[in-house]
Image (cartoon, rainbow, N blue to C red):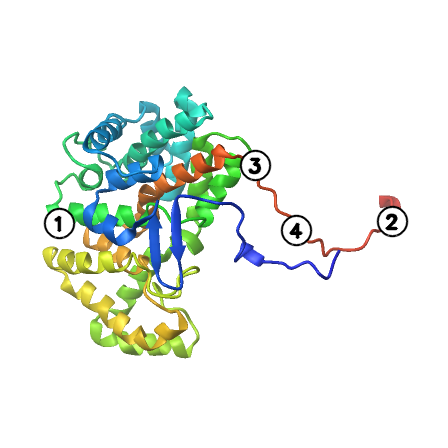
């Protein structure tokens, strides 16, 4: 044991590797994917284009994007055994079902076992399309319906809403889902991405790493914020009650959901791109009160922004899902749908200069002791 060893619990502030994927400036509230501002990507790109950028490192040409989109659409299929597995586990939490189905794909699709950059790209493209199919199929099966077949004419986000609800989404609703996926696609060495890299560090395959990432995302401290915000909004009930709610929470030293972030001290740069979309969607769905409650909470929390308690991206996500009538237990799987390309590129990057990730723990147990046979204890 050593008294001069500095312990950084949670590895906070520790750099374990270099990465060329995303840059986060928590003080300035800035997020870049491959050098491009999240603001430009959220307003001008599609999820497919952003997925290509993350995986390949550059924005695609028209031809490259068309080819990439064709590969995504061609991957919109699941082995029939996966539907059987979903049916057998249909009463489980959607994250458990999703994780189990992805693990099953590793056994059912031989190509998933290959460990190389080329294989990771191919398998990553396939998983990007299959993960939303699994989530939608589970929602159908657990409600006694047949899964909705994908529509090859629709983009990734619109097709997801179609498979989930069996109804063609409006252009605005599809675009908002697209932006939501873009904003969740990648975020540096977060818990699930780090866990995926640890798995790849052992020279495991991509599917194994995605199962690890899904298991990590399932924990409420990582993926549960959107659901917590929606519960808060329902508890508040009306905009007029927001100020008193915030005041009571702060007096009790309890967190107000959707505010603050492990990395950002300024406002989460992703939040603004969902704010206006939530307003429009709430009006389209005939429920403007949800947006009004959110904004009342933001106003009530304004005095605390100097302490780093600014709105984060999950503050608005939950209401988007609620307006679509999506059950709360699907909020974290939806986060996972958007994050797949980020996990894939983190795994590719880990593989490129792979090393076993094996940190140390400082022993603080008993000093060396003499063994006592059981007859003398």
Q: SS class of the residue under badge 4?
A: loop
Q: Residue furthest top?
A: 110
Q: SS class of the residue under badge 3?
A: loop
The residue beneath circle 2 is: 370
The crowding category of the residue bearing disc 4, from other C-alpha atoms within 10 Å (few below 14, some 14 to 19, many at least 20), is few
Query: In the rendered structure, which disc, 2 or 4, sits on the residue that comes first in sequence?
Result: 4
The residue beneath circle 3 is: 355
Query: In the rendered structure, which disc, 3 or 4, sits on the residue that comes first in sequence?
Result: 3
Question: At which x and y percent is residue 329?
Answer: 33, 49
The answer to whether residue 292 is left or right of residue 7 is left
The residue beneath circle 1 is: 172
Badge nearest the viewer, 2 or 4: 4
The residue beneath circle 4 is: 361
The crowding category of the residue bearing disc 3, from other C-alpha atoms within 10 Å (few below 14, some 14 to 19, many at least 20), is some
Badge nearest the viewer, 3 or 4: 3
Q: Residue furthest right?
A: 376
Q: Quadrant of residue 185?
A: top left
Q: Are marks 1 and 2 in contact (CB under 8 Å)?
A: no
Indicate the quadrant containing the N terminus: top left, top right, bottom left or bottom right: bottom right
Q: Is residue 325 visible in this depiction of the protein? A: no
Query: In the rendered structure, which disc, 3 or 1, sits on the residue that comes first in sequence?
Result: 1
Q: CA distance from mark 4 to mark 1?
A: 50 Å
Q: CA distance from mark 3 to mark 4?
A: 19 Å
The crowding category of the residue bearing disc 2, from other C-alpha atoms within 10 Å (few below 14, some 14 to 19, many at least 20), is few
Q: Residue at x 28, y 41 (%)?
A: 50
């Amino acid at each position: 044991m050593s008294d001069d060893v500095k312990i950084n619990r949670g590895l906070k502030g520790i750099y374990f590797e270099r990465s060329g994927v995303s840059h986060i400036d928590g003080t300035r509230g800035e997020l870049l994917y491959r050098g491009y501002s999240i603001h430009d990507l959220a307003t001008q790109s599609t999820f497919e284009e952003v997925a290509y950028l993350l995986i390949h490192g550059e924005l695609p040409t028209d031809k490259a994007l068309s080819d990439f989109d064709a590969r995504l659409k061609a991957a919109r299929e699941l082995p029939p055994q996966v539907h059987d597995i979903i049916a057998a586990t249909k009463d489980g939490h959607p994250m458990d079902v999703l994780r189990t189905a992805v693990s099953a794909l590793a056994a059912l699709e031989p190509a998933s076992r290959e460990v190389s950059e080329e294989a990771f790209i191919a398998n990553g493209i396939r998983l990007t399309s299959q993960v939303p199919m699994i989530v939608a199929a589970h929602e159908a099966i657990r409600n006694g319906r047949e899964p909705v077949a994908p529509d090859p004419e629709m983009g990734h986000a619109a097709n997801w809403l179609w498979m989930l609800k069996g109804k063609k989404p409006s252009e605005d609703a599809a675009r908002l889902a697209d932006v939501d996926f873009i904003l969740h696609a990648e975020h540096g060495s977060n818990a699930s991405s780090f866990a995926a890299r640890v798995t790849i560090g052992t020279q495991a395959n991509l599917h194994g790493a995605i199962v690890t990432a899904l298991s990590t995302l399932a924990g409420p401290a990582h993926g549960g914020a959107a659901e917590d915000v929606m519960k808060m909004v329902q508890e508040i009930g009306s905009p007029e009650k927001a100020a008193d709610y915030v005041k009571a929470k702060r007096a009790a030293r309890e967190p107000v959901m959707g505010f603050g972030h492990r990395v950002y001290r300024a406002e989460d740069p992703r939040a603004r791109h969902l704010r206006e979309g939530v307003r429009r969607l709430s009006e389209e769905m005939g429920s403007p009160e949800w947006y009004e409650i959110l904004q009342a909470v933001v106003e009530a929390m304004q005095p605390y922004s100097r302490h780093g308690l600014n709105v984060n991206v999950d503050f608005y996500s939950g209401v988007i899902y609620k307006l679509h009538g999506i059950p709360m237990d699907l909020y974290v799987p939806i986060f996972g749908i958007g994050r797949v390309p980020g996990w894939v590129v983190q795994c590719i990057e880990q593989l490129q200069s792979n090393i076993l990730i094996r940190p140390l723990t400082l022993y603080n147990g008993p000093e060396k002791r003499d063994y006592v046979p059981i007859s003398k204890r």
